[in-house]
Image (spheres, rainbow, N blue to C red):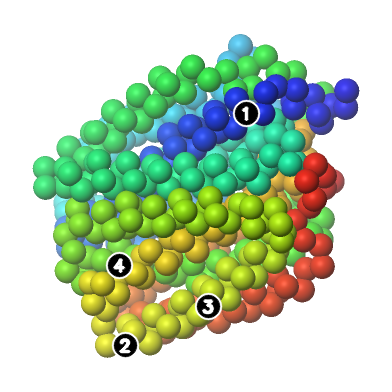
């Protein structure tokens, strides 16, 4: 049996189920950091440049390329290769949330953001490990399904965080909410322990060196996908960075804003992720990305006009729902292509190289958008996003090779 296929002998249904649960447990922290923390900071009276630092503090998510080769090379054999890193990350996240509960958003914003940096480092490690697990464990025909499950898991975690944690407990204060988050993540760690994942799988003889981080970018298809994602993501990143500010500024309380951003938004994203998966299979990832790009451009341009007179609460609700639906739809389309370009023996490294370069731009766009929101009109920011996404749609259409056919690997 070829070395690259030795991981795909286990039951794919079981592995997909584990990936679905893993996606929910990991995304609990991501949803809270990306939505809950900015809401609490804005509600505590922090200016836009402080809120924007939350997104810029996610830089470790980008820098995971530095330690991704270690993820591919090293593990505790008795735990499983990627299972080692996944369990370590989940345990660490629970402890860091305990630390986060000590820093009140009104009094210690910079201490809070420093802890967020550590949390995003853990999240980045888990993301790279899970992606490596998917590349090695799933056949090409199952990868679109796996990426859709990850997007759906993220949406479900948003519903959990928004409806059952922040919305119900926001009035009890920051510390209560974060302590409950820590408890929830700790319980998910115990449940995650029950999944064997890659425990017992053989380790490939070929291991990535510390100098191969960008080797996957020699593939022109990978470079093209990267360009498409950066351009298309311009509009999505700017709208994402402004969501918390928009919801608080139109008059919603933290609990209400969490209900809209995390629950209603996640429901919209969940349906988008589920519905887009068969479309990706039928039309190909690049064609789907082009459609999403043009829809994003129209969305940003239209809301840029509305922002000139200020948004109503209803318009702010629609703004969030559309942003989430487009973001979650883009995820399966791009990730199913990317996973097919990753070499199984350096799966986490190849995946992280792409995500790191893409993330440098997108996270900075989200952060800069929030930082500049106090000095530049929302309309101008959204029109910049509309232009980038519109250009990305044409670049995606120019790609002659659509998503790989079922059962085909394109890893270098």
Q: Is residue 311 above or below residue 343?
A: below
**Mark carried by residue 13:** 1
The label on residue 317 is 4
- Along the polypeptide, which appears first: circle 3 or circle 2? 3
Whether residue 364 appears in this view of the structure is no
How far apart are the alpha carbons under marks 3 and 1? 37 Å
> Of circles 3 and 4, which is in front?
4
Task: Classify mark 4: helix, strand or loop.
Answer: helix
Q: Position of residue 232 (x, y in %)?
A: 59, 69
| Location of residue 239 with respect to 132 vertically, above or below | below
Residue 194, horizontal then vertical, whole percent:
49, 17
Are the residues tagged 4 and 1 within 8 Å (C-beta)?
no
292 lies left or right of 6: left
Mark 2 and mark 4 lie on one chain; the one further toward the N terminus is: 2
In the picture of the structure, the residue carrying the numbered disc 2 is 308
Cβ–Cβ under 8 Å for marks 2 and 1: no
Q: Does residue 233 lie above or below 353 as drawn?
A: below
Nearest the camera: 114 or 339?
A: 339
What label sits on residue 297 in the rendered view? 3
Question: Of the residues under marks 3 and 4, which one precedes in the sequence?
Answer: 3
Q: Say if mark 2 contacts mark 4, CB within 8 Å.
A: no
């Amino acid at each position: 049996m070829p070395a690259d296929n030795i991981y795909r002998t286990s039951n794919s249904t079981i592995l997909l189920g584990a990936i679905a649960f893993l996606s929910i447990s990991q995304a609990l922290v991501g949803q809270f950091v990306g939505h809950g923390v900015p809401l609490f900071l804005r509600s505590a009276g922090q200016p836009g440049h402080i809120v924007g630092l939350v997104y810029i503090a996610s830089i470790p998510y980008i820098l995971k390329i530095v330690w991704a080769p270690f993820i591919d090379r090293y593990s505790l054999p008795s735990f499983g290769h990627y299972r080692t890193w996944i369990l370590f990350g989940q345990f660490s996240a629970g402890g860091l949330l305990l630390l986060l509960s000590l820093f009140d958003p009104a009094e210690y914003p910079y201490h809070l953001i420093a802890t967020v940096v550590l949390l995003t480092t853990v999240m980045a490690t888990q993301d790279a490990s899970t992606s490596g697990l998917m590349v090695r464990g799933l056949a090409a025909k199952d990868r679109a399904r796996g990426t859709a499950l990850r997007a759906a898991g993220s949406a479900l975690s948003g519903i959990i965080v928004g409806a059952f944690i922040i919305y119900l407990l926001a009035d009890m204060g920051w510390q209560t909410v974060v302590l409950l988050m820590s408890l929830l993540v700790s319980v998910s760690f115990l449940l995650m322990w029950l999944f064997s994942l890659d425990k017992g799988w053989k380790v490939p003889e070929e291991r990535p060196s510390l100098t191969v981080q960008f080797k996957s970018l020699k593939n022109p298809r990978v470079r093209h996908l990267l360009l498409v994602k950066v351009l298309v993501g311009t509009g999505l990143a700017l709208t994402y960075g402004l969501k918390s500010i928009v919801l608080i500024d139109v008059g919603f309380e933290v609990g209400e804003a969490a209900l809209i951003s995390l629950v209603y938004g996640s429901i919209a994203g969940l349906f988008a992720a589920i519905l887009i998966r068969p479309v990706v299979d039928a039309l190909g990832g690049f064609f789907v990305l082009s459609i999403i790009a043009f829809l994003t451009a129209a969305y940003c341009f239209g809301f840029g006009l509305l922002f000139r007179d200020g948004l109503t609460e209803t318009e702010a609700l629609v703004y969030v729902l559309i942003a989430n639906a487009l973001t979650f739809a883009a995820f399966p389309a791009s990730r199913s292509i990317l996973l097919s370009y990753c070499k199984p023996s350096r799966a986490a490294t190849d995946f992280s190289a792409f995500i790191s370069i893409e993330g440098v731009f997108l996270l900075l766009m989200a952060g800069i958008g929030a930082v500049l929101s106090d000095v530049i009109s929302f309309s101008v920011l959204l029109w910049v996003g509309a232009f980038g996404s519109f250009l990305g749609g044409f670049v995606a259409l120019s790609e002659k090779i659509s998503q790989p056919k079922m059962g085909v690997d394109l890893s270098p």
